[in-house]
Image (cartoon, rainbow, N blue to C red):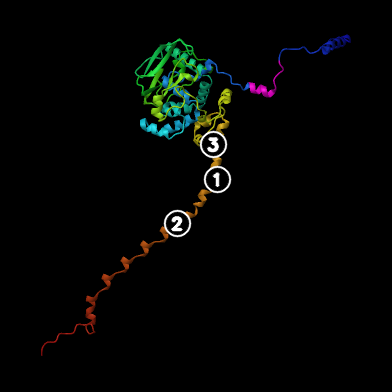
Amino acid sequence: QQQAPQQQAQQQAPQQQQPPQQSDQQPPAPEGQQQADSQQATPLTQQQIQQLVAPIALYPDDLLAQVLTASTYPLEVTLAARWAEKNPNVKGDALQAAMEKESWDPSVKGLAAVPQVLAMMNEKLEWTTELGEAFLAQPDDVQTAIQALRAKADEAGNLKSSKEQKVRKVRATPGPDYFGPPEYIVIEPVEPDYIYVPIYDPVVVYGPGFWAPAYAPFFWYPRTWVVGPVFGFGVAVFVGPALWCHYDWGHRGFAAIRVNTTRYVAFNKRAYPGGRNWRFNPAHRNAAFKNKTLQRQFGRATTTRGTQLNRATRTNKSIQAAPAKKGVKGAQPGAGARHVEPRKPAPKRAEPRPHVQRTPNVQRKPNVQRKPNVQRAPNVQRAPHAQPRSQGGKNANPPKRGKQ
């Protein structure tokens, strides 16, 4: 037992005298750099992107493209949805004239012709924000996910041509810029100026057992919808030139979103500034990005219309339910109430008015001026009846004297 501690000391001594071994590994980064690296945007998986695009993957191509572009401006989508709810009967030329007065992005203005879609994007505002950021950061992966889901719906027998839409498969033209599948599915309206918005349960329409429980997408439908078939449509909606985006499948990046310049000019009354391909305009973002890559690329874009958006979001439940952002801090209801408090003295200025403005009750001229009741001239002038009293007076008529 006494030799055991000595043996342990002898074994530890050479270990302490050995020099540290050199290694090719770099020393650990400082804590600040580790935090910066951890904040790098991690690309979404194909399963996550499919979950995002599942509720709209079976929309007609033009409507689908415009939903994706408008989702990059979530706060303006909220304003447009509130406007559409208050003006349900404004359509056609009247809608175009009304949209000229608004300062939203043209892609958001176009969706005012489809209020059902705006209502969904507003009620699912967090989903709209995530969809827009996924489209900006990974447009090719979004395109791949949409075509994969369309193929699953077709395989399940739930994607067919009808009186509302045309579904066709197009063989891709090989080229250096094409990266999609050899065959892609196109969905078009039967009549170009009218849209039937599909209504379907994503968990069912893509086939049983396709979704893992953790990635099951939501099923949204309008309040007037009666749940019935697996795949249905809303009423026909006249859109005219309002939907000016078009999906050009197989092209990379934003080159896949082509702009129909004829429709754009007809609806917005001006030329499109970005050529034929859609371009993101950060001036209409009005909110910070969650995606770190997009933050570095576009910055925390804000505009001078922040006050207008804050007032709009104070009474909007969809915005209040969204995660708090630094760019939307003014939208909190508590902060908005404090800004109204200085206006409370205004009613005190109006308090003396009820005591002063009582002239109608004081000036009772109609009750004082009773001339018709005082001037009783017809009853006072009784000259004919007073003549008998004054027969001997001066005013009496002298008797007539006859001739003597």
Q: Is residue 303 visible?
A: yes
2 or 148: which is nearer to us?
A: 148
The residue identified by callout 3 is 333
The residue identified by callout 2 is 357
Lower position in the chain sequence, tag 3 or tag 1: 3
Q: Which amino acid does label 2 sit on?
A: Gln
**Which region of the structure is painted magenta?**
26-37
Classify the position of the N terminus by image quarter. top right
Lower position in the chain sequence, tag 3 or tag 2: 3
Q: What residue type is labelled 3?
A: Pro
Question: Which structural element holds mark 1?
Answer: helix
Real-space Cα separation, disc 3 to disc 2, in angstroms: 38 Å
Q: Which amino acid does label 1 sit on?
A: Pro
Q: Which numbered marker is on residue 342?
A: 1
Location of residue 404 (image quadrant): bottom left
**Rendered location of residue 377, percent (x, y):** 28, 71
Please state which of the two labelled residues, at mark 1 or mark 2, is closer to the viewer. 1
Q: In this view, does 379 lie above or below 240?
A: below
Q: Residues within 10 Å of mark 1 (few under 14, many from 20)?
A: few
Real-space Cα separation, disc 1 to disc 2, in angstroms: 27 Å
Q: Residues within 10 Å of mark 2 (few under 14, many from 20)?
A: few
Real-space Cα separation, disc 3 to disc 1, in angstroms: 16 Å
Q: In this view, does 186 lie above or below 125?
A: above
> Could you tell whether 253 is left or right of 19 in the image?
left
Location of residue 233 (image quadrant): top left
Q: Are marks 3 and 1 in contact (CB under 8 Å)?
A: no
> Could you tell whether 189 is left or right of 401 in the image?
right
Question: Which structural element holds mark 2?
Answer: loop
Lower position in the chain sequence, tag 1 or tag 2: 1
Magenta-colored stretch includes residue 372: no
Magenta-colored stretch includes residue 27: yes
Q: Which residue is drawn at 47% across and 54% down?
A: 353
